[in-house]
Amino acid sequence: MASPKRRQQAATLRWDQVDLNAKTLTVLDTKNHESHTLPLSSYLYELLLSRSQKRINGYVFPGTGAAGHIIEPRKQMANVTKLSGIHFTVHDLRRTFITIAEGLDVSAYALKRLMNHKMNGDITAGYIVTDVERLRKPMQQPIIF
């Protein structure tokens, strides 16, 4: 829920895509074939900083299989479900992030940038320049909700 990334994007995230100094992460292999750089919320920054000190390979979320990264977080999700009593899917986390952000009045254009959705057919969107710094506050808001 701390980031609107898709499951595969999170699972295959490599440390060379994370810039802890700039507090950003960049996903290279996206659904719309355009790289996507996101600012890290304070929560994500602390989480990644802690994980970076315990690296075992090039992946942020390493796995024990041949791929080297986690494939399906079923065990981790089952543990959370057991502790919380709430069943959820990975996509539910993405949906919840964006729902909370929208409820906090994050602009539709910022939401689309956070989700890396194209704005085809939206003429106004073509005039809006949104860099990673403009997304910092919207990225942080669902975390402090």
Image (cartoon, helix red, strand yellow):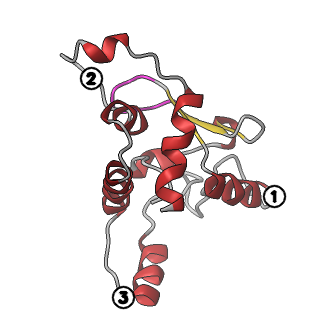
Q: Is residue 24 above or below residue 45?
A: above
Residue 40 colored in magenta in the image: no
In terms of secondary structure, where does tag 1 sit?
loop
Q: Is mark 3 on a helix, strand or loop?
A: loop
* Separation of marks 2 and 3 at Cα, in angstroms: 37 Å
Name the mark nearer the viewer: 1 or 3. 3
Determine whether label 1 and label 3 are within 8 Å by CB: no
Residue at position x 56%, y 45% from top? 13
In the image, which disc is placed on residue 53?
A: 1
- Residue 138, image x, y percentages: 48, 43
Asked whether the viewer can see residue 55, the reply is: no
Residue 30 painted magenta: yes
Type of secondary structure dominating the magenta stretch? loop
Determine if residue 46 is in view. yes
Which region is colored magenta? Answer: 28-34
- The three-letter code of the residue at mark 1 reads Gln
Image point 72% across, 59% down: which residue? Answer: 51
What's the CA distance linking mark 1 and mark 3? 31 Å
- Which residue in the protein does label 2 denote? 119
Task: Please tell me whether mark 2 sits on a helix, a strand or a loop.
Answer: loop
Residue type pointed to by label 2: Met
**Placement of 112 over or under 58, stated as above or below:** above
- Closer to the observer: label 2 or label 1? 2
Other residues around mark 1 within 10 Å, as few (<14) / some (14–19) / many (≥20): few
The picture places residue 81, in percent across and down from the top left corner, at 40, 82
Tag 3: amino acid = Gly
Check whether the beta carbons of the residues at disc 2 and disc 1 lie within 8 A of each other. no
Residue at the disc numbered 3 = 85
Q: Earlier in the sequence, mark 1 or mark 3?
A: 1
- Closer to the chain start, of discs 2 and 3, is 3
